[in-house]
Image: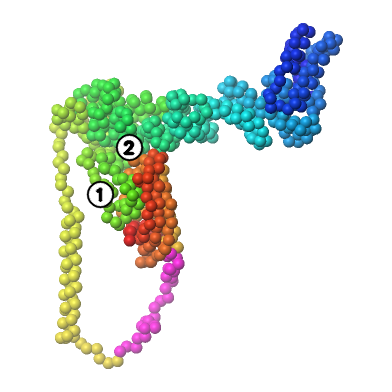
Amino acid sequence: MQIPLDYYRILGLPMQATAEQLEQAHRDRTLQLPRREYSEFAIQSRKQLIDAAYVALKDSGTRQVYDAQLLAAGAEPALIEIYEQQLIGALLVLLELGEYELVIRLGRPYLTSGASALEGGDEHALADVVLTIGLACLELGREQWQQHQYENAAESLETGQELMLRENLFPEMQAEIHADLDRLKPYRILELVARPLADKAARQQGVALLKSMLEARGGIDGANDDASGLSVEDFLRFVQQLRSYLTSAEQQDIFEGEAQRPSSVGVYLSVYALLARGFAKHQPKLVRQAKQRLSLLTERQDVYLEQAVCAVLLGQTEEATYALERSHENEPIAFIREHSAGAPDLLPGLCLYTERWLQQDVFPFFRDLDQSNVTLKDYFANAQVQAYLESMPPEDAVPQPPIGRFGTSDYGGSGYSRVPTDYERPSFGSAPSVGVGTAATVGLGAAGAAATAGSRPTAYTAEEVSNLSPDGQLDDELTASVGFDEPVVKTRRRSSPKWGRLALVLLLALGGLIVLGFMMSQLLSLFGGLFGGPKIKGDPLDIDVTRPAIELPTADIQPTATGDVQVIAEETIEKWYEIKSEAMGPQWNVDALADILLEPTLAQWVAKVESNQREGVHLEYEQSIQNLTAEELGDDQIQVTADVSETGNAYQFGEYNGAFSYEDQLTVEYSLRKEDDKWMIESFAVQ
């Protein structure tokens, strides 16, 4: 067979080499031995080629003839003929010359069909070929790494590793390649996520690699060794560098997972992703989630300014001013005060700061938002934002504890007929949460010294709030429309009528009248029968209980079989537990509850899920249902009773929490109602 080599290259010499250089090169090449993993057969095959090259060039006459042949070939590659058993030696020489791709191309066919020909020379020949190709992949990968071709480098390294794993050979070499792949991983991630947004497959691969690094390190600020060579500080800098290449959705996905570990860094970065997406995509629900997560960090760092920004975007101006008062960020606070000059509170400066901070300091760290130019006016004018803020529940409400806290199961919560405990009964504070709609107004609370002096809040419309000019002053038209010198009408809280008590009195009165009327009718009937009225005389009518008195039309509607009711009940209860696991799981899919629950149970369970989400708690269930019986109460109502064994394993920010976990065995009564041809659960009761 022919190999693209010439004698000068085998010895590592130029054509102009002297006889002394030729002899020295032969001696040096003979003394240089390959890796110790090679067999004696491979070493001797290599030596044969080196000796043949030296013999051909040592004699001056033979050398002149050979040189003439090389010159006549011109640009054509020189070839030498070898026996097939000498392939190992030729591959070794090519490997030493850096011809890595050629080694892989020539050696691969002999891993399968050509192995027997090589094994004729030595029983270890196949292992020698595997080792040579593996070394070529390793060196080629390192060469591509140096050329910043990180994905190509990874492909070369993985090819060599897979080859050795498949043949179950050279574990030390496998470890060496694996170590290079670990050190290469940060470079690969950076290359993959830097690709265009349209290249979704490559970007997803980069995100998956990043998640594998996070898992190996034990989190974004974990101290475990992932073999990448990056310290905790280096890795944090690496993540910061990556952020500008990742989209807001990718960052939300990554850092929400980190927040569950728990990790304060993960929580903080997830807040930025939620806040950026919420503002840029007009999704105040994400802003609300960001605000809730910031409350987890207040004990360890000053995040009150970020809380103030979230409160502004949610129309909660009293909370915004309260957060500003607690912040120690001197430079931003000075900016806000400067641009609120002449106003009765700090909201003008805070609105301006919010808009500039998001556009200049937050958006540049997101690949899909770095060119966004969203304004507060655009945000508040969005119909989706208006609808959400108008329907948003009060943020001041004392949150319900996670399901299962204090050793109680889901069946002890307010979603069932049992009377709820004090822990499960929501109570509301006095500070209102103001929604911003088309005609809604935002009350701006006084802050700092202005609050102490008793200054009164001023009302701005959502559009007016977003119309602050870049220099921090209100537009002339806005100033005129607000009228700072006009007195503000104070609203008094009216005591709400006791509708519940009034309704109870009316119901009792109505019930009394009904009972009294019934008694009177019975008395009149009794007296009428005794003292007057006609008597029935003669034979009774010929009426047989086995047949109707008159012919009845044949009904087409067939009664529902007992078995059908049982199937409906089993399927509905099974669906409930599937949706319950999804809603109370780590994704907190609250929307799924509407597919199985009716009001008022639906609202109660939505509150439970949102409470758990605020506190970072999710549950994983193990359930079994026995002795399920169903009774049809009508065409659209079924009563179901079942023995339920349920274990709820609670996790807070990704860590198991035994205090919230529980194990219960209960008998539960379910009330099922049919609505729009779909069976739903109307209520629960624990027997």
Residue lying at 37% horizontally and 25% vertically, measured from the top left:
361
Q: Secondary structure at mark 2?
A: helix
Q: Determine which quarter of the picture holds residue 139.
A: top right
Residue lying at 22% horizontally and 39% vertically, measured from the top left:
431
Q: Is residue 565 magenta?
A: yes
Q: Determine which quarter of the picture holds residue 544.
A: bottom left
Q: Main secondary structure of the magenta part?
A: loop
Relative placement, left or right, of 141 versus 77 is left
| Front residue of 659 and 333 | 659
Is disc 2 surrounded by few (<14), some (14 to 19) or many (20+) residues within 10 Å? some
Residues at marks 2 and 1, CA–CA distance in whole angstroms: 23 Å
Residue lying at 17% horizontally and 56% vertically, measured from the top left:
501
Number of numbered labels in the structure image: 2
Please state which amino acid type lies under the numbered disc 2: Gln
| Front residue of 653 and 599 | 653
**Label 2 close to label 1 by CB (< 8 Å):** no
Indicate which disc residue 292 carries: 2
Indicate which disc residue 311 carries: none
Q: What residue is shown with label 1?
A: 422
